[in-house]
Image (cartoon, rainbow, N blue to C red):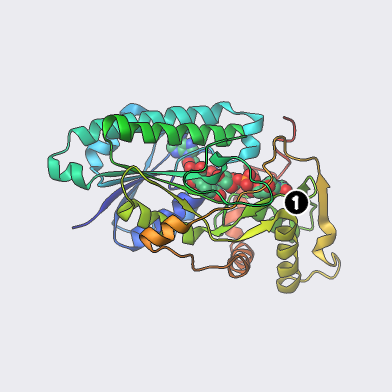
Amino acid sequence: MTRRVLVTGGAGFIGSAVVRRLVRAGWEVLNVDKLTYAGNLASLNEIDNSPNYRFLKADIGDGAAMREALDTFRPDLVMHLAAESHVDRSIDGPGDFIQTNVVGTFTLLQEALRHWRGLDAAAQKAFRFHHISTDEVYGSLGEDGLFREDTPYQPNSPYSASKAASDHLVRAWFHTYGLPVVMSNCSNNYGPYHFPEKLIPLTILNALEGKPLPVYGRGENVRDWLYVDDHAAALELIATTGRLGESYNVGGNNERRNIEVVRTICAIMDRLVPDAALGAREGLITFVTDRPGHDARYAIDAGKLKNELGWVPSETFESGIEKTVRWYLDNAAWWEPLKARYDRARLGAKG
Ligand code: NAD
Ligand code: TDX
């Protein structure tokens, strides 16, 4: 039987990795995306001629559009990734985060529930709604410890608060209405097709152009990095085999201080694209005013996912970051046009 999946946010960074993966694996895929500044159909060039792929430009907050998409496409699976995703933008303008991440998720849940209730018993049993979320809902760790699925929620930014709210809505629709849901909370992703407002692509492109590399505070904050295709593999597994009503943490045991990440990128670029006039790119590192409310450390315990579903990541941080830098060097055609949408100026500096 062909499996049918409706992916929201499939023109974004992680969503496009999921769509590329599932189209290649033979799923029938409907990508529903509003195409905000972060949405980019060029991220789907590798698969968008496939007969098992189609695209719908729509807002998840548009109930009528979601209703029609569900009724006509009739998915077995909904993978919900559409969101406003950048913490710094959430500091400057939280309204869009509430609208899409909270109200949009609510609207999608209502339409998914209505759709699910209208299915026959066999189709109801087969249907799943997978909500994709972030480890930032757990707040900030000190020197020790890891986020587990039972870690209390303590979101600190407008972004993470909006994602926490959406997680709670999804869980409530399971407990109250019986909608068959699974959830996952992942650490920081990196890899190809990442919009250059985020630390890693911003650093690569600025380092290439000899521009300052802004590091917030002293660069001591720790993130736990996961290569995006490893996340996409985990998502397929969770969506298809995760236990209903459960959440799974996803992470690759790759904790790094931000300053280490930036230095690693500099070293790789000095090797791959040496620039005698520029000298060592570490010299471009510039410490700037810290992010307001900056979480100190994120780190994931992915033991449940490994033990229950058998997922392990394929990339280490070293292999993944090398691949990522090479991808940006080879794919200027993807990122050059983005300069018109975002000039890589500082966002979210004023709390
Ligand atoms: P992204 O910003 O790259 O992409 C988001 C996509 O959603 C874009 O294509 C955008 O056009 C679309 N979108 C936004 N608002 C929409 C709306 N109202 N209706 C329809 N489409 C809309 O984000 P990403 O980094 O790919 O993140 C995807 C999901 O994964 C998000 O839910 C995010 O919270 C979560 N997540 C991200 C990370 C990370 O490191 N990037 C880590 C863990 C979890
Ligand atoms: O220019 C920068 N300099 C800098 O030091 C930028 C953009 C960021 N930083 C720091 C802030 C963070 O400590 O680097 C770290 C990573 O920052 P981001 O790339 O903005 O990611 P983060 O805030 O950690 O959130 C990301 O991971 C979790 C995604 O954007 C979220 O969508 C995801 O949920």
The quarter of the rendered structure image containing the C terminus is: top right
The quarter of the rendered structure image containing the N terminus is: bottom left
Residue located at (81% from left, 55% from top): 285
Q: Is residue 228 left or right of residue 347?
A: left
Residue located at (19% from left, 45% from top): 125
Q: Is residue 136 left or right of residue 2?
A: right
Q: Quadrant of residue 252?
A: bottom right
Count how many numbered circles sit on residues in the image: 1
The x and y percentages for residue 221 are 71, 49
Which amino acid type is marked by label 1?
Glu
For the residue labelled by badge 1, is the local secondary structure a helix, a strand or a loop?
loop
Q: Quadrant of residue 325?
A: bottom right
The residue nearer to you, when weighing 233 against 303, is 303
Picture layout, residue 109 above or below residue 13? above
Residue located at (59% from left, 28% from top): 94
The x and y percentages for residue 273 are 73, 70
The residue nearer to you, when weighing 249 against 277, is 249
